[in-house]
Amino acid sequence: MEALRPLAAEAGMSMVQMAVAWVLANPVVTSAIVGATRPEQLDDAVAAVDKSFDAGLKVRLDALTQEYRWGDDIR
């Protein structure tokens, strides 16, 4: 998590916005399921749709999280 915070700040997004935008940047994902317990949490997540998601950011996020994503490579 701490490695991701600077990336979100650099991109001008909250962590939630970056996470939702990252999911939506995956071409095989047709929709993102977002859970929220308060309206402001939903507002934050929905705002990700309006954020531009740089391809370089996706590459950096993919590299930082590769060891945690099962199915990306044969283990």
Image (tube, rainbow, N blue to C red):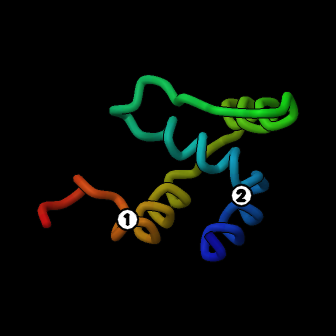
Q: Residue at x 66, y 41 (%)?
A: 52
Q: Residue at x 42, y 24 (%)?
A: 30
Q: CA distance from mark 2 to mark 1?
A: 22 Å
Q: Quadrant of residue 15?
A: bottom right
Can you say which quadrant of the picture contains the C terminus?
bottom left
Q: Residue at x 59, y 41 (%)?
A: 21
Q: Nearer the viewer, residue 35 or 31?
A: 35
Mark 2 or 1 closer to N-term? 2
Answer above or below: position of 6 versus 46: below
Answer above or below: position of 13 versus 50: below
Residue 37 is situated, as x and y percent measured from the top left of the image, at: 77, 33
Residue 13 is situated, as x and y percent measured from the top left of the image, at: 75, 52
Comparing labels 2 and 1, the label whose residue is closer to the camera: 1
The residue tagged 2 is 11
Residue 32 is situated, as x and y percent measured from the top left of the image, at: 52, 30
Can you say which quadrant of the picture contains the N terminus?
bottom right
Secondary structure at badge 2 equals helix
The residue tagged 1 is 68
Q: Residues within 10 Å of mark 1 (few under 14, many from 20)?
A: few
Q: Residues within 10 Å of mark 2 (few under 14, many from 20)?
A: some
Answer above or below: position of 42 versus 72: above
Q: Nearer the viewer, residue 7 or 38?
A: 38
